[in-house]
Image (spheres, rainbow, N blue to C red):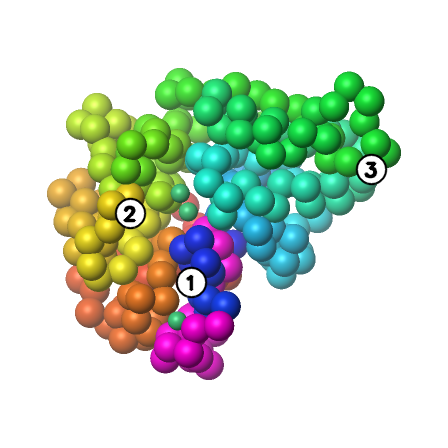
Amino acid sequence: MLGTGTSSGVPMIACPCAVCASADPKDKRFRSSILVESGATTLVVDTTPDFRSQMLRADVRKLDAVLFTHPHKDHIAGLDDIRAYNYFLQKPMDIYANEMTQESIVREFPYAFADLKYPGIPEIRLNRIDKDPFVVGDIPVQPIQVWHLNMPVLGFRFGKFTYITDANRIDPEELEKIRGSEVLIVNALRHEKHVSHYSLQEAVDLVQELGIPRAYFTHISHQLGLHADVNATLPPGIELAYDGLVIHS
Ligand SMILES: [Zn+2]
Ligand SMILES: [Zn+2]
Ligand SMILES: [Zn+2]
């Protein structure tokens, strides 16, 4: 888990609350992203505003691809920093995103797609995805389309491991794609209901409805409370994720 925080991160700038003031490292949350590694292939899901710090902290020397969930700023803002991988790996970065997200990336990073490119800008190779499975290196990927209020967002299933951020509704046929996962990462913003994210209880209900044996919650707001306090209240098999958590699947 490269980051487990909501769009503002935790601590939130200028916030005096007990969570933002906490000394527990598990209450320090970069914006939400994961690193997925097989023996041969390394990819990240999303490039957050904390992407550079996340790559340095996890000491990621080789990165083969970026998969994007949706174009909200907390999921794409760090894209410019793939330049380091362009430089050291001497190749463009493969980006996998749906049409909506690709349009945003081209609009928000226009210099990377200009006809005359300034030296040193990010080099990007766009790969269009939708709901169909695809393969990155030796990692098979099954996209799962979920709803973030009215925005279609992609979750991703890698074998028995499923990652879903920024959602509060999933259609029945997409739910079926998650079923059978051994591990589910899913967003749980806070206790109160929210228009575009699952609340803590809604996330627990989803995990239990699907019968997933092991689940971790991400995209967490400072409003959820202290990691240790909230984690202690969760049913068996369900935990809050935290930055730096490593899951073997
Ligand atoms: Zn988000
Ligand atoms: Zn706070
Ligand atoms: Zn979002």
Q: Is residue 157 visible?
A: no
Left or right, 208 with reference to 130: left
Which residue corresponds to the image point at 31% horizontal and 38% vertical from the top-left? 148
Q: Secondary structure at mark 1?
A: loop
For residue 194, side relative to residue 68 (left or right): left
The amino acid marked with disc number 3 is Gly
**Residue pointed to by mark 3:** 120
- Residue 53 lies, in percent from the top left, at 63, 58
Numbered circle sitting on residue 67: none
Image location (x, y in percent) of residue 158: 42, 35
Figure label count: 3
- Identify whether 153 is placed above or below 216: above
Q: Main secondary structure of the magenta part?
A: loop
CB at disc 2 and ligand 1 closer than 8 Å: yes
Q: Secondary structure at mark 2?
A: loop
Q: Residues within 10 Å of mark 2 (few under 14, many from 20)?
A: many
Does the magenta run of residues contain 49?
no
Residue drawn where x is 48% and y is 35% of the image? 71
Q: Amino acid at mark 1?
A: Tyr
Q: Amino acid at mark 2?
A: His
Mark 1–mark 2 distance (CA, rounded to whole Å): 18 Å
Identify the mark at residue 242; answer none if there is no mark.
1
Residue 220, compared with residue 210, is above or below; it is: below
Of marks 1 and 2, which one's residue comes earlier in the chain?
2
